Every structure is written in C-alpha cells, then in structure tokens.
Image: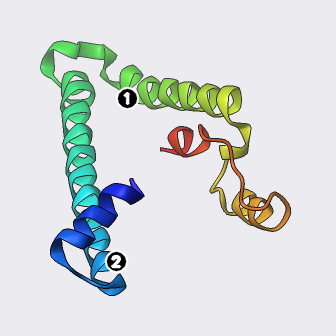
C-alpha cells in the first residue's frame, strides 16, 4: 500500500504534507461510504424485523416478539464476543489501555471485527 501511495504522491508532485492530505481524503471517503452502508443496513434490518413485528398480521405475538427479538440478539452478540474475542467485551477502553501499556499495542486481528 505504501508503494501505491508513494506513486500517487510522485504523480501529483507533492511533499510529505500533500501525501498526508491525499491519505486523509481517502480515509474520509472510505469512512463516509462505510457510514452510509451501515445506516442503510440498519434501516433495512429495522424494516425487516420491527416492520414485521408491528404489522397487523403478527397478531397477539407482537408483545412477545418485541421482548424476545432483542434478547435473542443480545444472546447471539454475547456468544460471538465471549467465543471469539473475550477481550472485546464491554466498552473496550480498559483493554486498549492494557494493550498499550503491557502488550506493546498488540491486539488480535479479530477484535475490531468482533467489536463492530
């Protein structure tokens, strides 16, 4: 990746600040696209789950589904966290401080994905 960014910097004939600016713009664009995809996914799942639960066809099961759908989601999320990356539990601040001071900043590759 460094080689590609270096070629871009050489192509535009920019100094170190210019390449940092190009990298910042790329990161900003990727973050914006990720946020849009995340928001769209939330709206899709909301319509899929909550829309079906609150529809008139759900009948008397509405209240039961409203209680159990989030509970089942919590159980699945807990299983993923404790099964794949127990250090990802909670807010994550405590583990990040520990990783910085005691583990030289090393965390397992799966932790960010489990936290997401």
- Looking at this view, is 47 or 59 the one in front? 47
Q: Is residue 17 left or right of residue 79?
A: left
Q: Is residue 37 left or right of residue 103?
A: left
* Residue that label 2 marks: 20
In the rendered image, the vertical position of residue 48 relative to residue 102, given as above or below: above
Which residue is at a point 37% across and 57% down the rendered structure image? 3
In the rendered image, the vertical position of residue 34 relative to residue 85, given as above or below: below
Task: State the scheme by which the image is colored.
Answer: rainbow
Give the image location of residue 19, x and y in percent. Answer: 30, 76
Quarter residue 62 falls in: top left
Among all residues in the image, which is located at the extreme right?
A: 102
Give the image location of residue 57, x and y in percent. Answer: 15, 13
- Looking at this view, is 19 or 37 the one in front? 19
SS category of the residue bearing label 1? helix
Which residue is at a point 81% across and 68% down the rendered structure image? 101
Which residue is at a point 72% across and 53% down the rendered structure image? 106
Q: Earlier in the sequence, mark 1 or mark 2?
A: 2
* Residue that label 1 marks: 66
């Amino acid at each position: 990746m460094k080689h590609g960014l270096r070629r871009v910097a050489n192509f535009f004939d920019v100094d170190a600040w210019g390449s940092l600016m190009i990298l910042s713009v790329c990161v900003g664009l990727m973050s914006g696209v990720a946020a849009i995809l995340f928001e769209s996914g939330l709206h899709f799942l909301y319509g899929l789950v909550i829309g079906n639960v609150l529809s008139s066809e759900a009948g008397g099961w509405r209240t039961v589904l409203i209680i159990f759908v989030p509970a089942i989601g919590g159980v699945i999320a807990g299983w993923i966290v404790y099964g794949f990356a127990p250090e990802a539990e909670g807010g994550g601040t405590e583990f990040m401080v520990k990783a910085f001071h005691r583990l030289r900043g090393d965390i397992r590759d799966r932790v960010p994905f489990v936290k997401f």
